[in-house]
């Protein structure tokens, strides 16, 4: 893999290694002066890039050890959510939540604080109870939530800066069914004035809007069974009568089934089906996560920028994420609203618009998604993480030789 999924980052690494065992990962790291883990390359930022070597864990044996009684699963770090979710479901278990796509690597998603939606759903990394990782010296160590109280919360969302994760243990819940309904043509003012009502209307809620002059939103509701159809005329919108793709004009078959069709959690919580291209394919993404008490203020600020945003935008998605205690999670310590933008794939054209959007939301001190593009300076981002100094200390402890450091993490560390 020489570029990221979107093609906007060309990896500078001299080599991409694909070890077949944990021992091989250890030997590789011990013999390297600069090396970093690469997941499935779905980040739009240069977080994975390095001038040293990259190591993909996709060649490790694909272990999925399910502990049904303990509601836990231990997986090797090269696996994607689409590899583990069906196996979990067959065993009667589920993950509490998933991102918009199941194509992403578990370790990469965890390392960047990737999230789905839901007032009560924390980011995907919050499910991690144990990590196995290779440190800069090539040692294999484990970190556990119930034991390593002074380091665990820093090691989970760690941007690959503390080591190469080789296995993760995730907490699970009993498997559940979900039905998905899409409401179209909801007046944007209804979202603005009834934000809490909208985001609490289902287990997972996504509000899509294009910031165009028509000022309408589409709301995707994912209800666990027993699910009831929403009331007629909800928020002045209309219930969609055919499956939709979040981006107008793109094929609905790429999206997970809607219209209230019953299905297992892993075939409804993501918006996109694993066997098809997620989202647009040709795009750039940015996302700002801010305290949810600022939702109305932030949306109002963007409402003023419609004419600036809309020409460069494919779609925007507004979600909520529950607070967590992971030091570098964008939802650390605060219930969060996440405002996402899928832009056209033209970095030069998007850059000034992105700056304007991020300036308009600056009063709300947003934290940009680690895996997406941003114009916010690293020092400003660092200041928005109360535990950043603790994270810096942790990195010095786990990586005293700066083996895992790259330009991206160096700017914070
Ligand atoms: C179409 C699309 C839709 C998306 N939807 C969402 C969404 O719904 N919600 C959301 O929050 N994000 C979303 N994202 C962003 C995506 O979830 C993140 O970029 C995530 O990091 C991707 O995982 P990855 O395996 O591709 O990581 P990569 O991009 O490969 O790597 C990201 C970081 O993780 C580190 N890493 C990877 N593997 C390991 C390991 N084994 N040990 C240590 N560090 C490791 C890398 O070093 C790097 O720093 C989306 C991206 C795309 C392309």
Image (cartoon, helix red, strand yellow):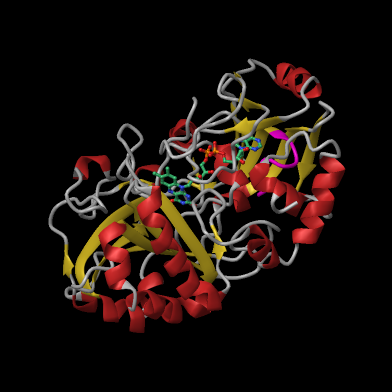
- The question of residue 200 being in magenta is answered with no
The foreground one among 377 and 162 is 377
**In this rendering, position of residue 339 left or right of residue 48:** left
- Could you tell me residue 262's position as x and y percent? 28, 49
Q: What residue occupies the far left of the structure in this picture?
A: 241
- Could you tell me residue 353's position as x and y percent? 39, 63
Q: What residue occupies the far bottom of the structure in this picture?
A: 193
**In this rendering, position of residue 104 left or right of residue 402:** left
Q: Which residues are magenta?
A: 156-164
- The question of residue 157 being in magenta is answered with yes
Majority secondary structure in the magenta region = loop
**In this rendering, position of residue 35 left or right of residue 104:** right
- Could you tell me residue 30's position as x and y percent? 81, 23
**Residue for point 65% across, 65% down:** 380
The foreground one among 312 and 116 is 312
**Above or below, 343 relative to 77:** below
Residue 159 is at least partly visible in this image: no
**Residue for point 43% across, 68% down:** 357
**In this rendering, position of residue 232 left or right of residue 83:** left
**Residue for point 23% across, 55% down:** 260
Question: In the picture, residue 59 is in which quadrant?
Answer: top right
């Amino acid at each position: 893999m020489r570029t990221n999924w979107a093609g906007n980052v060309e990896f500078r690494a001299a080599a991409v290694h694909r070890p077949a065992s944990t021992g091989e990962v250890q030997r590789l790291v011990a013999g390297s002066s600069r090396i970093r883990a690469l997941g499935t390359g779905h980040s739009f930022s240069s977080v994975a890039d390095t001038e040293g070597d990259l190591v993909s864990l996709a060649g490790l044996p694909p272990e999925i050890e399910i502990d049904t009684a303990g509601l836990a699963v231990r997986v090797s770090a090269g696996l994607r959510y689409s590899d583990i979710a069906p196996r979990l479901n067959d065993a009667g278990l589920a993950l509490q939540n998933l991102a918009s796509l199941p194509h992403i690597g578990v370790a990469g998603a965890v390392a960047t604080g990737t999230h789905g939606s839901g007032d009560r759903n924390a980011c995907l990394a919050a499910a991690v109870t144990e990590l196995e990782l290779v440190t800069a010296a090539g040692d294999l160590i484990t970190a556990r939530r119930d034991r390593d109280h002074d380091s665990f919360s820093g090691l989970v969302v760690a941007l690959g800066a503390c080591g190469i994760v080789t296995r993760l243990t995730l907490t699970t819940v009993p498997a559940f069914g979900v039905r998905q309904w899409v409401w179209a043509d909801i007046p944007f003012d209804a979202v603005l004035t009834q934000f809490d009502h909208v985001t609490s209307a289902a287990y997972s809620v996504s509000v899509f809007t294009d910031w165009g002059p028509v000022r309408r939103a589409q709301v995707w509701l994912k209800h666990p069974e027993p699910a009831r159809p929403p009331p007629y005329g909800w928020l002045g919108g209309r219930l969609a009568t055919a499956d939709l793709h979040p981006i107008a004009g793109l094929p609905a078959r790429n999206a997970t089934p809607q219209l209230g069709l019953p299905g297992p959690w892993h075939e409804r919580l993501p918006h996109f089906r694993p066997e098809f291209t997620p989202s647009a394919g040709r795009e750039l993404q940015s996302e700002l996560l801010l305290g949810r008490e600022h939702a109305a203020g932030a949306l109002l600020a963007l409402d003023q920028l419609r004419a600036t945003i809309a020409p460069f935008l494919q779609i925007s998605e507004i979600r909520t994420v529950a607070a967590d205690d992971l030091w570098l999670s964008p939802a650390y310590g605060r219930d969060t609203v996440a405002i996402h933008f899928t832009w056209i794939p033209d970095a030069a054209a998007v850059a000034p618009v992105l700056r304007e959007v991020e300036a308009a939301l600056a009063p709300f001190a947003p934290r940009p998604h680690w895996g997406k593009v941003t114009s916010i300076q690293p020092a400003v981002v660092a200041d928005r993480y109360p535990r950043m100094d603790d994270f810096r200390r942790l990195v010095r402890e786990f990586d005293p030789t700066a083996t895992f450091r790259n330009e991206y993490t160096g700017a914070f560390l």
